[in-house]
Amino acid sequence: MLPLASAAALHLGEFLPPLVACVVYLVLYERRVRTLARRGMPVAGWRRAVFAAGAVLVTVVQLPPVDGLADSILMMHMAQHILIGDVASLLIVLGLTGPVLRPLLQIRPTRPLRRLSHPIVALVLWTLDLYIWHVPLLYQAAIRYDLIHALEHACLLWFGMLLWLALIGPLPKPVWFSNWARLGYVVAVRFLGALLANALIWAQEVFYPVYRASDAARGLNPLSDQNVAGAIMMLEQMILTVLLLAWLFFRFARQAEERQQLLDLAAERGVPLSERRATLAAEADSSELLRERLLADGPRSANQEADWSER
């Protein structure tokens, strides 16, 4: 009985942290959402759903049977990392709004979040995180030691969230980070990820010998396992890139329409509004605010709102 009890306690100790983290994320998020609802600032239901989906996904892929397979097969470990660092992080960020994040930004340890989510800073940190954790020494250490493995997954999630916050998150963006800059950002992410994926696909030597024994036990070739892992990474990046490009072009079209609507409304109201100011308002997602000012208060308020958009 004692060995069985010890084994159960060991497994519980491995699986408890992701479960506890999931509950904490969901409870804190739901408390904030309810607070905002009481203040008349409800969070859309779809945002709540995708946030919950992201938190649950992070947890599920760190529990059996996925986690056990990831420890013994490289291609499964790669799939696990993709789900944590790309998919779950994206879902969580889609669930965030400015009001939801406001208390977090007021806590001293998390105040640098605004600077860390700057597009260039976030891209550099994400790239370093991606490549450092794929260095054979660290990658294999994560397989052998649970604490390092937990740190690896936490880094993949957090830096993935920074990457998405910089691109589509609710925090303020630099003026230069226009739609064309976002397009370049997506291309840069795709290129940086493709370099690593190609290295795994076309390698003629095994980078991670830690998988040799488990691959052999399952009748797998370690080099083929590694090549397939790179192919999975490449395929996921291609699909994600297509989705992001579709989102960007939809954003292009929507903002062009909003800009023209603002200009037409300003012309009807006899309010001077330049194309540049209308464009900035559309890109800053403040078209509705500017439209209300144009309808309610006339030229002075409209120009103030346009100036706010430029900032």
Image (spheres, rainbow, N blue to C red):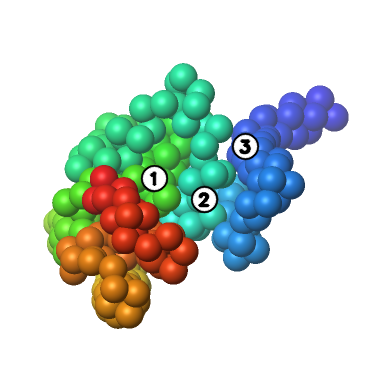
Specify the amino acid type for callout 3: Ala
What is the spatial separation of the Cα atoms under label 2 and label 1, in whole angstroms?
10 Å
- Of the numbered discs 3 and 1, the one sitting upstream in the chain is 3
How dense is the environment of label 1, judged by Cα within 10 Å: few (below 14), some, or many (20 and up)? Answer: some
Specify the amino acid type for callout 1: Leu
Specify the amino acid type for callout 2: Leu
- In front: label 2 or label 1: 1
Front position in the image: 17 or 95: 95
Residue at 47% of width from left, 31% of height from top?
A: 105
Front position in the image: 131 or 171: 171
Q: What residue does disc 2 label? A: 96
Please tell me whether mark 3 sits on a helix, a strand or a loop: helix
Residue 304 visible to the viewer: yes
- Residue 122 in picture, x, y percent from top left: 27, 41
Please tell me whether mark 2 sits on a helix, a strand or a loop: loop
What is the spatial separation of the Cα atoms under label 3 and label 2, in whole angstroms?
17 Å
Marks 3,1: beta carbons within 8 A: no
- Residue 283 in picture, x, y percent from top left: 29, 62
Q: What residue does disc 1 label? A: 171
- In front: label 3 or label 2: 2
Marks 2,1: beta carbons within 8 A: no
**For residue 293, above or below residue 254:** above
Q: What residue does disc 3 label? A: 21
Q: Where, quadrant-wise, is the C terminus in this rendering?
A: top left
How dense is the environment of label 2, judged by Cα within 10 Å: few (below 14), some, or many (20 and up)? Answer: many
- Of the numbered discs 2 and 1, the one sitting upstream in the chain is 2
Residue at 29% of width from left, 73% of height from top?
A: 270
Residue at 46% of width from left, 37% of height from top?
A: 154
Residue 283 visible to the viewer: no
What is the spatial separation of the Cα atoms under label 3 and label 1, in whole angstroms?
24 Å
How dense is the environment of label 3, judged by Cα within 10 Å: few (below 14), some, or many (20 and up)? Answer: some
